[in-house]
Image (cartoon, rainbow, N blue to C red):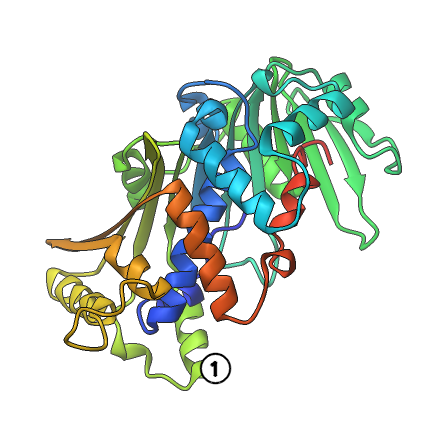
Amino acid sequence: MSRLPTATGVYEFFTSDRVLAVFLAGLLVFGAGCSGLLGDDGGGDSAAIDSVPENVDGVIHFDSGIIQDDATVTFMNGLLEMSGENQTYQEILDEIESESDLSMEDFNSATTFMRLEDYEQEEYAGMIVDTEWTWEQLQEAGDEEVEDPEEDEYNGVTVYKSTDETGQETWAADFGDGVFAFGTPDAVRDTIDTREGDANSFGGELRTAYDNVEDGYMKAAFIVPEEEVNQASEEAGVDANYVPTPQIMTMTYYTNGETMNLDTQMTLASEEEAEQFSQVVGATLDPPSNDGGNQADPFTRLVDAISVEQDGENVTIDFSMAASDLVDLIEQLAQSFGGGMGDSGFSSVSTSAPGLAG
């Protein structure tokens, strides 16, 4: 849940209308589903953003205010019903609170960051969570089968080190005020140094892009690794020069009544590339026939919910659809690909929720 879609998905997104459909639906599931597990309104979290280390490729911030959002509740209940889950979204949250003794109302925000360029070679990823919890509460809510982590100290901050069955080490830093950092050792060390004022926070084009994203329940910015685009193109047997590669991609997820919205912006190297990029997207979204397409077809319905605009070096793709309509659309898409929702992984929502302590 902490990793953004790679450039592979971005490239395929603009070269296949069916992949386009699934990619958009997946982003909405990602944005709504993950942030839907958070607690009550926590507002913005500039301290967490300022603690994200430099030299990262992607940042995602989840705001906790979504828990009472009508559209998200409708959406999550629809996914759970399709997956065969016999509990509602609220019942699952209540169960999580009962089993862990962690109140979701005390969860304020989560900010994840990663280096996409080095992801396959050497993972670098972390999460900063802002809560009203203590480390003892998190530890009690953790997996009982996991041994107690080793307590240590780094730069004046208490850290807890644990190693999984594969030998990968994970750190957790307790800043003592309900704020924790989880992740790979390097990522947590860098977060501590940044938060303590001994290292710079992330900046440059990525920070500018993130700061310019409209607020929402989920907002993200990441640099598109060109190497992954080229690799995906080679594997697919497609010329990578066919579609210009965006340099930076931003997203924000928000709701308006029962409508779910995902706004995505791509920044290209030049206005000329942005125009070419926009034209390719527009061609992808054009119906395959002159009759406007079959309005009952799920891909036509999805395309109708998308708008594309170009402004200078930027191409903006906005998606907007009522939550109940999106649930119906996802079910149709799953059936079109010959699978049911029970095989798609949505049923894991009920068992993957806290996931913060371990």
Is any part of residue 57 visible from this angle?
Answer: no
Instruction: Decide if residue 183 is on the left or right side of residue 163.
Output: left
Answer few, some or many: residues within 10 Å of disc 1's Cα (few below 14, many 20 plus, some between 14 and 19): few
Residue at 60% x, 50% y is 346
Name the one closer to the observer, 262 or 131: 262
In the picture shown, does residue 105 fall above or below 247? above
Residue at 67% x, 24% y is 94
Name the one closer to the observer, 106 or 71: 71
In the picture shown, does residue 131 fall above or below 272? above
Name the one closer to the observer, 319 or 137: 319
Residue 75's spot in the image, x, y percent?
47, 40
Instruction: Decide if residue 10 is on the left or right side of residue 105.
Output: left
Is any part of residue 3 visible from this angle?
Answer: yes
Residue at 70% x, 15% y is 134
Res. 207 image quadrant: top left
Residue 55's spot in the image, x, y percent?
44, 45
Name the one closer to the observer, 297 or 154: 297
Residue under label 1, please give it.
Answer: 235
**Which residue is most to the bottom?**
237
Residue 251's spot in the image, x, y percent?
34, 45
Secondary element at image label 1: helix
Give the position of the C terminus as an image quadrant. top right
Residue 343's spot in the image, x, y percent?
64, 61
Q: Give the residue type that dot 1 points to.
A: Glu
